Image (tube, coloured by chain):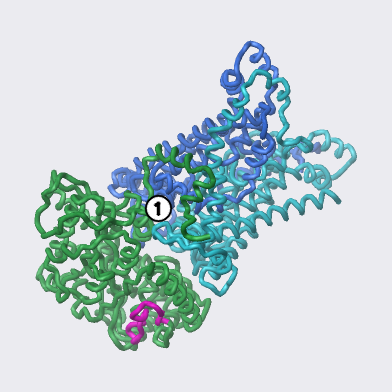
Chain colours: A green, B blue, C cyan
Amino acid sequence: MSDSFSRRSFLGLTGAAGLTAALAACGGGTKIGAGSSAPASAAPSFSGGEYTGPKVTLDYWNGFTGGDGPHMRAMVEAFNKEFSGRIEVRNITRRWEDLYPAMPTAIAAGKGPDVAIIHNDWIGTFAARRTLIPLDDVVGALELTEADFIPAVWSAGVFDGKRYSVPLDVHGLGDYWNREHLEKIGLSEAPADKASYADALAELKKAGIATPFWMPNKWPAHLMFMSLLWQHGGELYSEDGAKALWGSEQGVRALSWMVEQIDEGFSPPKVAIDTQYAAFKNGRVSLTWDGIWQINDLKANAPSLQWGLSPVPNIGGTPAVWSASHNFVLTSQAGKDPNKVQAAKAFIDSVSRRSTEWAKAGMIPARNSVREDPAVADLPQVGLAKDVGVFRFLPALPGVGDVQSKALELAVAKAVLKQASPAEALKEGVATADKLLADNKRKYGR
Amino acid sequence: MNLRSPGPRDTRGLRRALLHLVLALVAALYLSPLVYMVSTSFKTREGSGSTEPQWIPDPFSTGAYREILTSADSPILTWFANSLIAATGHAALVLVTAAPAAYALARLRFRGRGAIFTTVVATLFVPPVVLLIPNFLIVNELAWVDSLPAVIVPAAAGAFGVFFLRQFFLTLPGELEEAAELDGCNRWQIFTAVVLPLARPALVTLFLLSFLTNWNDFLWPIYVLLSPDSLTLPAGLGNFQGANSIRYDLLMAGAVIASLPVIALYLVAQRWVIEGISRSGLKG
Amino acid sequence: MTGPAPREEGAPPAGGDGRPVTVLERPGRPSGAAGPAAGGATRRMRWWTPYAFLAPYLALFAVFMVLPIGFGFWTSLHEWDVNLPAKPFVGLENYTELFDPSSVDGGRFWLAMRATGIFTLFSVPLLIVLPLLVALLMNGRFRGRNLYRAVYFAPYVLGVAVVGFLWRFLLDGNIGLVNHYLGLDVQWTTDVPPAWVALVGVTVWWTLGLNAVIFLAGLQDIPRELHEAAMVDGASAWRRFRAVTLPGLRPVTVFVVNATILASANMFGQSYLITAGAPADQTKTAIYLIAETGLRQFDMGTASAMSFILAACLMAASALVFGAFRDRSAR
């Protein structure tokens, strides 16, 4: 048996090939996989500004289902107005967890997005799956340079020497606090280091908040763990992407701190998914770490709650916080039509230029120069970005998402659920991660 | 256990009252989740997230329905249409393919009949999980991914319809067919003019069961339908969950919309559905 | 109606998949040569007529039933990612890896098989005993009987998506009705064993009516004379139940037990929607993992291998059930 005995000849052997072909005629759907990898973009290179081709419709997928959604929709509407009669962008929003698995299949089937927003850590995976086409010329036209970006955000978009993304924003974890609760213990802001955090929680408990700081075991537990790991001086993965390093002693200390919050009685055990945030909204929780994009949700859905937002406390010694960035990508589906490529580039170009508007959605503009713009400098989340050196990112290794979900997230969950000690959970998780990393190297290296 | 057992009149009456009490209590408990689903769908966003149970929405609001019916990201009317086309198409395809096949297996004599019937029935024992991945790949080869044929056609290959109808055809008296044959009808005419009208109850039952199964199918559509415009209702419902916050008012309104057709069908054809299902297990 | 997708329901689908219906065929009738009128009905017929009747169905059957079984096995011998051009042949490696519990996929797979096993073990007895009780209660001629039957059956006509989301709401740890009325503070969706109680409970609520109507039909098939004869003999209600009802229900019971085991072992939607596999993948069932591995992470070779191992286990379980009931009847 060899590769040459392919699936096609197998179909033929069974005598059903004729049938399948006949049935295919009545489909109207599409086919993905073999042979559908992107043709190198035949479109002329993009130099910014105008789109001169015939009218095209672009499908634009993103995962802005939260408070950020309406802002993105408004930006798309503004673009459609400006390019009315030439380019129409259809804004399609699905939850990230539904979007990512559907995207490679849908793109290959020609039913996916022409242009999409993806997180920095997915760029490598999608580029390796040949679902994206390079954007070097857009970056050139936008006059984007590495110097204007956080280096990790910038370099995440490069795969095999080509640039596949245009960063739109940066976002990360923040420490949300209940003003009323903190005032009870005489604080006007969330405590910023390990000792004062512990003191504050103890005080809050005395002040009648039974469990002031709920420790999740699902989302965003892994983001908290990664932040703490970096704070303790640990690293996630080796440079070459061959080894998981988060099982180090620093990792154990990071995870142990999370578990201690339960042991100390600051958190109930086995917190259900998302309930730490729901409880914060209901005024039952004093402090909770969550994404900065929740700002809009809190404004809209917890209008009576008095809250504030501080940087995540420095528990480990070195300030660090998990961050990510939303990036525009152009897909191989658009790559089949040079006009779509041009139109999509015009779209990316146009929206990127309005990143101040996007900042109002609760995001931090990716470009250093934009953050200094007085229009955004006063937004609460931009205040968290005074020192972008603390922003740390997941590396864009192909397949890293699988490693995270099958190994790291599971290890964190197991420890927080007390199914294993932090050290045991991490040891087991790292063993899994190393195997997956090796598999990925093989799989995506072909 | 036999409730008709003779006994003193009063104990029998008492037993009967007790039986009714138990059955009615359980029935009320049984339906209460559905009542709460409908109730929640008429609540405001705040009302649906309240920690105090509220059976009668206060304030009463149709906002959730208005919101989901006009949502740009979740085109629920498109999903409704998709579900309707898929379920009807699937049920029709099952009838059109299974009925003649079942008739041939029940009534006609031909070489290979035993082997074909055995093979078809044997697949009733094949756990359907083994079909999941390869059928995805086959549907992909056919370029059906993300389109309705993917949720209409493959499931019609199941052996149940053929088996169910064959068992029914076997119970029909053969005399009518013989008479038709003497009148000079050919096989196809006998099948369409004599057998199918006689088999109407079985055909209706099979249509209903196929429709229900397809309307409610979840596992297959969520993987084979990808873009928001191609989803069926069950696959689309999840879209009403936001980023780490669930809008239960929207979700319950969507669930009510997804349930209405099958509940309506059930109310109208309850006897057919139940008899069909209970009989399918017994007499085949 | 056997679909390309395994049924996610916790009980057999409306007349559905993998149903061992043949068990209940009249004994002694050779399956191929049945048909009371078969004799006279073959005179004027071209040789190809029967094949023409069969052709449309057999075409579907070949492409979506026979082909995938072979194709699935073929896939399981490869490292197969639909989105990557290279699909190297790996022989039985996918299988050996799954049988190695220390490997990544092996560990995940057996955890999922354990979840499927736990769910099946706890749901099947309840889904036999409770529906049987309900059927016995309703096996009489009294007013409102059909109404009760319709009510108990009603949840089953709803899809798992509706049932799953509805119960996730009712079981919510903070705003759920269940905790409120029981006066509890239990995390039904994220903690085991409560999550198992929730998943089994929801499934019983959803599919009890199905098994109940099948039992009811079976009860009504037991000849009245048998009961009456037993009564004349002065047998107590319990003795009549043991001596008449239970033996009379045997064929139905074999069918229900088997169909329920298969359906429970195919549980997907409840865990996907209510617990999402929490805590730490402990309620992620085998089908859930197979779908996730093959259709989300596109590791289709491993997923196919998993589905063949699961299928083998299910067929073994079916054989055991048949064996158990056959032994009893032989005694």
Q: Which residues are magenta?
A: A229-246
Q: Position of residue C233 (x, y in %)?
A: 90, 39
- Rendered location of residue A180, percent (x, y): 29, 73
| Residue assigned mark 1 | B238
Confirm whether the magenta stretch covers residue A78.
no
For image coordinates 60% across by 25% down, the residue present is C49
Mark yes or no: residue C91 visible.
yes
Task: Kindly report the secondary structure that dominates the magenta region of the rendered protein.
Answer: loop
Q: Relative to B278, does residue A57 appear above or below in the rendering?
A: below
Q: Is residue C80 left or right of residue A378?
A: right
Q: Nearer the viewer, residue C41 or C175?
A: C41
Q: Quadrant of residue C169?
A: bottom left
Q: Residues within 10 Å of mark 1 (few under 14, many from 20)?
A: many
Q: With respect to residue A418, does C127 lie above or below? A: above
* Quarter of the C terminus of chain A within the rendering: bottom left
Q: Could you tell me residue A194's position as x and y percent? A: 34, 86
Residue under the image location 76 percent in, 35 percent down: C29
Is residue A365 or residue B272 the one in the foreground?
A365
Q: Is residue C289 visible?
A: no
